Amino acid sequence: MYSFTKVIAILSCVLHYAAAFEGDLTYYTPGLGSCGETNSETDAVVALSPSQFTTDPQACGKKIQIHLGNATTMATVADKCPACSPGSIDVSPAVFQALAPLTIGRAQIEWDYAT
């Protein structure tokens, strides 16, 4: 028989995984973003797809966790990526390099809002 704690722990993992987004990771040179802040290549910032940016009126400033293989990093929503499909994100070079070398240019990732 499972204990209540084990059941909650298992459900927590399942629900967390189910909430994750999947898509392409690309990088760009940040500047004045859709959130009204100016950022640089060394800032840990991310641009969301238009559909995800506009469906969350409070997207600006939210933190996300990005997973690529065994690597994980965090970034703050600062911009909208007009060319990104739902689930895909565009990040600063600093964020990209925390996950993979810039030379690969594009990678399949999972991400979710940090809790």
Image: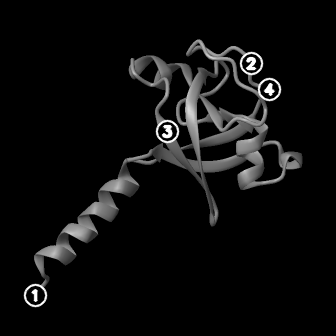
The residue beneath circle 2 is 31
Q: Nearer the viewer, residue 108 or 53?
A: 53
Residue kind at label 4, given as amino acid type = Thr
- The answer to whether the residue labelled 1 contacts the one labelled 2, judged by CB atoms less than 8 Å apart, is no
For the point 59% across and 14% down, the residue is: 34
- Assign a secondary structure to mark 3: strand
Q: Which residue is mark 4?
A: 29
Q: Is residue 32 left or right of 4 when viewed as pictured?
A: right
What residue is drawn where x is 11% and y is 75%?
4
* Residue 113 pos. (x, y %): 44, 42
Judge whether residue 48 can be spotted in this image: no
Circle 1: element type? loop
Whichever of callouts 3 and 2 sits on the residue coming sooner in the sequence is 2
Asked if the residue under mark 2 is in contact with the one under mark 4, i.e. CB atoms within 8 Å, the reply is yes
Q: Which label is found at residue 1?
A: 1
Q: CA distance from mark 3 to mark 2?
A: 18 Å
The amino acid type found where label 2 is placed reads: Gly
Residue 5 visible somewhere in the drawing: yes
Chain-order first, disc 1 or disc 3: 1
Q: Are marks 1 and 4 in contact (CB under 8 Å)?
A: no
- Residue 63 circle label: 3
Between the C-alphas of marks 1 and 3, the distance is 38 Å
